[in-house]
Image (cartoon, grey):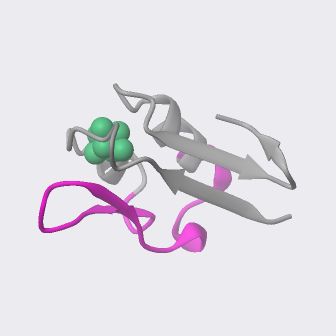
Amino acid sequence: MAIEIVVDPELCMGSGNCAFWAPGVFELDDEGISEVLSVGAQPEDKIILAAKGCPTQAISVIKDGEKLV
Ligand code: SF4
C-alpha cells in the first residue's frame, strides 16, 4: 500500500497547517513552502487530516493510484 503525497508549490501559501498536523511528513522550506519529508513519519489518517486541512488544497494524497485527497 504505497502512499504518494504531492504538494503544489504554486498553491501553498505557507500556513504551516500540514506541518502541525503531520510533523515529520511535511516541513516548510526556507521560502515557507511545504515539502514532503517522509511519507512514513505519520499514520495515514494523520496525513489525510493534514491534507484536508490545507486551506488552499495544495496537498494531494494518492494511494494505490487512487486520489484520496
Ligand atoms: S497546509 Fe497547505 S498552504 Fe499550509 S503550508 Fe501546508 S501545503 Fe502549504
Quarter holding the N terminus is bottom right
Q: Which quadrant contains ligand 1?
A: top left
Is 49 on the left-hand or right-hand side of 21? right
Is 9 on the left-hand or right-hand side of 16? right
User: Where's residue 30, x and y in %?
Assistant: 12, 68
Decide which of 35, 26 is in the foreground and name it.
35
Identity of the residue drawn at 55% across and 47% down: 46
Above or below, 31 relative to 47: below
Identity of the residue drawn at 67% across and 60% down: 4
Outermost residue toward the front? 10
Above or below, 37 relative to 64: below
Outermost residue toward the top? 55
User: Where's residue 29, x and y in %?
Assistant: 21, 66
Identity of the residue drawn at 52% across and 70% down: 41
Is 18 on the left-hand or right-hand side of 28? right
User: Where's residue 61, x and y in %?
Assistant: 64, 46
Look at the image and say whether residue 5 sits in the magenta stretch. no
Identity of the residue drawn at 34% across and 25% down: 55
- What is the tally of numbered marks visible in this picture? 0
Q: To which quarter of the image does residue 58 belong?
A: top left
Is 21 on the left-hand or right-hand side of 47? left
Above or below, 2 relative to 60: below
Quarter holding the C terminus is top right
Q: To which quarter of the image does residue 48 belong?
A: top right
Region in magenta: 23-46
Q: To which quarter of the image does residue 3 belong?
A: bottom right
Decide which of 15, 47 is in the foreground and name it.
15
